[in-house]
Image: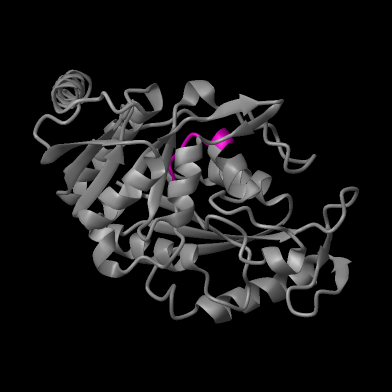
Amino acid sequence: MFHRILAATDLVTTVDAPVLTAARLARHHNARLDVLHVMESSSLSNRRLVRHYATDEERLADADYEQSVAQALRQTYGDVLAGINVSLHIGAGFPWEAILHWSARIDADLIVMGPHSTRSQEKGVVRIAGKVGSTVAHVMTHETCPVMIARHPAEEDLLHFRRVLIPVDFSRSCECAICFAARLAARCHSRLLVFHMMPVPPVPKYSREAYARDKNHARERLDAFYTTYLDGIDHRFLIRAGAVPHLEILKAAEEHQADLIIMGSHTKETSGKWYPGSAVERVAYRAACPVAVITDPQVLIRWDGRLSDDQSKTADRWIHVFTGT
């Protein structure tokens, strides 16, 4: 299922949840792991001008400094990465560009990240409750392979993915998420919980009869849309009425003890800026288990590999959830 996993971290001397989760996942799937640390630039004009990971002093990211960062990472993650086929990569510049660059370069089939920077306070960045960080948002809106958000280190037992929750609303991205979930279930023998929330009209006249009618209609739609993809897969449809999607999704994940949530991202443009869907952001920010986000390739922003001038432009990669190749 997973052959090449890319884990991104902005920490050097402390074990980061995404790397720990990715290492456990790589060990379980016998996958190759690439760990990327981006030395975030402190200058817009010179991306090689960074702040030292230990002293916070401004300096140029020359070869000697990169080696010292790599050595510190090996020391920090020595026990975590023991027995795994792993490579460490050090880059400088904008983190999301570096992640996209390395993902394309190694042909990653999964990217593991945290929901926000773990160094946001020292960078002077104000976190917005319920929102993933800008790096995650940029990767989601540009990347064609699945992006897993790990807020906490996932325990080994969770990574068997025995119970997987997939919230759906009949969109194309949710269709992609179902296809990916079906492939995962076939490999991991998972039980898929396909979750759909019916919006409850804010009027007192919404009767039990109307609710039962809408629920039956929703089940018929679920059967029509997704049963073909789930043929031979252990699955169950969950239908609930609610008003706030991310709260209902989180509640369902907790009640059914989901090991993983797989969501389709509703990438959209607002006032000239692109955002992942609000439910995706809020669930990824709050979920106790990892959240894998799949974005419909048709709505992704084109990215031409602008990490550095000496790198050739990299064509967009298409998501492989349908063919499995």
Image: magenta residue range: 141-148
Query: Is 84 placed left or right of 9 in the picture?
Result: left
Q: Residue furthest front?
A: 204
Where is 281 relative to 123, above or below?
above
Where is 287 relative to 71, above or below?
above
Give the colour scheme shown: one colour
Whether residue 62 appears in magenta in the rendering, the answer is no
Residue 45, position as x, y percentages in the image: 91, 48
Whether residue 147 appears in magenta in the rendering, the answer is yes
Number of dots carrying numbers? 0
- Which residue is rendered at x = 19% and y = 50% of the image? 188
Q: Residue furthest right?
A: 45
- Quarter of the picture containing the C terminus is top left
Can I make out residue 98 in this image?
yes
- Which residue is rendered at x = 78% and y = 66% of the image? 63
Residue 117, position as x, y percentages in the image: 62, 60
Query: Is 296 placed left or right of 120 in the picture?
Result: left
- Which residue is rendered at x = 50% and y = 44% of the image? 281
Query: Is 280 placed left or right of 42 in the picture?
Result: left
Can I make out residue 111 in this image?
no
Q: In the image shown, does 191 or 145 lie closer to the viewer? A: 191
Residue 200, position as x, y percentages in the image: 31, 30
Query: Is 248 placed left or right of 147 in the picture?
Result: left
Q: In the image shown, does 243 or 320 lie closer to the viewer? A: 243
Residue 198, position as x, y percentages in the image: 29, 29
